Amino acid sequence: MKTIKIPYYTSSLDLHIQEENLEAVINAKTDDYDPGKSETELVEEALANPIGTLPLRELARGKKKVTLVTSDHTRAVPSKLTLPILLREIREGNPDADITILIATGLHRPTTEAEQRRMFGDAIVDNEKIVVNEAFKDEDFAYVRGLPSGAELWVNKVALDCDLLITEGFIEPHFFAGFSGGRKSILPGICNAATVNENHSYKAISSPYSTTGVLAHNPIHEDMVCAARAVNVQFILNVALNAEKKVIAAFAGDLEEAHAEGVAFVRKLAQCPSVTGDIVITSNGGYPLDQNLYQSPKAVATAEACCADGGVIIMCASCFDGMGGTHFEKLIVRGTVDEIDEYLSRIPPKETIPEQWCAQIYSRILKKHRIILVTTYLDHELVRKANMIPASSPDEALAMAYEMMGKDARVVVIPDGVAVLAVKE
């Protein structure tokens, strides 16, 4: 019997599995990577040696208004570490700079003050100017241009009304944008709902290039890069993290060049050959990304790449914050998976419903695989309405899966499905 820890909320759950059933345990190589330097040293070294731009302190000289875009409560960006360093760099170049921190929420709910204090620390919340993006407040946005997809680009005025626009974030595989980080701070981060919705339309999500690890010809990525260039992002700081959410690398400088180097680094550590299993067990990496069902398709899409046709996916996600967005909840429980997909497929890009993309991806996967959701927070009857099977522990879920697939079923475990890029060779 083997025991494997599966990330769950702020801790983990134990999975017990007979070794004869265990086909593979797939982990990203990030956990074994030793950068040989502290987190602070990595960030400061990246800022001192930017890729494709002048150092941040030089860019800040003579600038009156500076907007610094950071991530919200659903992301593990180590802002308590990075923001003080970025603010110091800006002020060393320009002590009188008027700096606004803009929290990129995309379509998520506003980040609370308590969450800001946890993410940034009391000193920043008490002493810095912070604005939270609210995508549904149309008056906060201004039109910039059309995007390659035909969507209109509307961006938060705080990012447009500045002399220097900076973003921070982290890079990991992303289930339809290829990779996170870089340009995503702008779109979807600080765009209005209409812009985000059309970028995430049924048509865009359906593209064969809109998938994990793919940037070339990815229509979602192409819109995002265009948006970030259009608002003149002059400097980015992106980090790579291990399973403990510790910085193992940092990349600073030009929007595309620095992001590309970060992507190459993360791809090298995250990409693994896919291993086929009748049952695939995974998680969203624990807190903060497992806080609701809306976020959970990220890891389910990784499991899909390793699951045999007709196989079972076991997803461990606390969902302590519930289903996620109200639109997603209504869509994911509106009928069978075929009915949901048929309904979504008829929605034109400009009429895209907020959060429909996660319902679309779930429907795609549920057409091929049964999904058992391990959650101790989300009401199990609601899980059933979402066309999934509820369980309270990985062991309970595995017992259910054996009943479906047979006691000799091959099991693949991907403890953190968000950190892994599974590729068929």
Image (cartoon, rainbow, N blue to C red):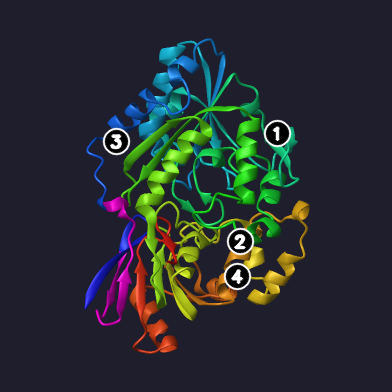
The residue carrying mark 1 is 141
Distance in Å between CA atoms under marks 2 and 1: 31 Å
Are the two marked residues, 1 and 4, in contact with CB atoms closer than 8 angstroms? no
The residue under label 1 is which amino acid type? Phe
The residue under label 2 is which amino acid type? Pro
Which region is colored magenta?
13-31
The residue carrying mark 3 is 39
Distance in Å between CA atoms under marks 1 and 3: 35 Å
In the image, is residue 20 part of the stretch drawn in magenta? Answer: yes
**Residue at screen point 65% across, 77% down:** 336
Secondary element type, mark 3: helix
Secondary element type, mark 1: strand
- Comparing labels 2 and 1, the label whose residue is closer to the camera: 2
Q: Which mark is residue 364?
A: 4
Q: Quadrant of the C terminus?
A: bottom left
In the image, is residue 73 part of the stretch drawn in magenta? Answer: no
402, above or below 48, in the image: below
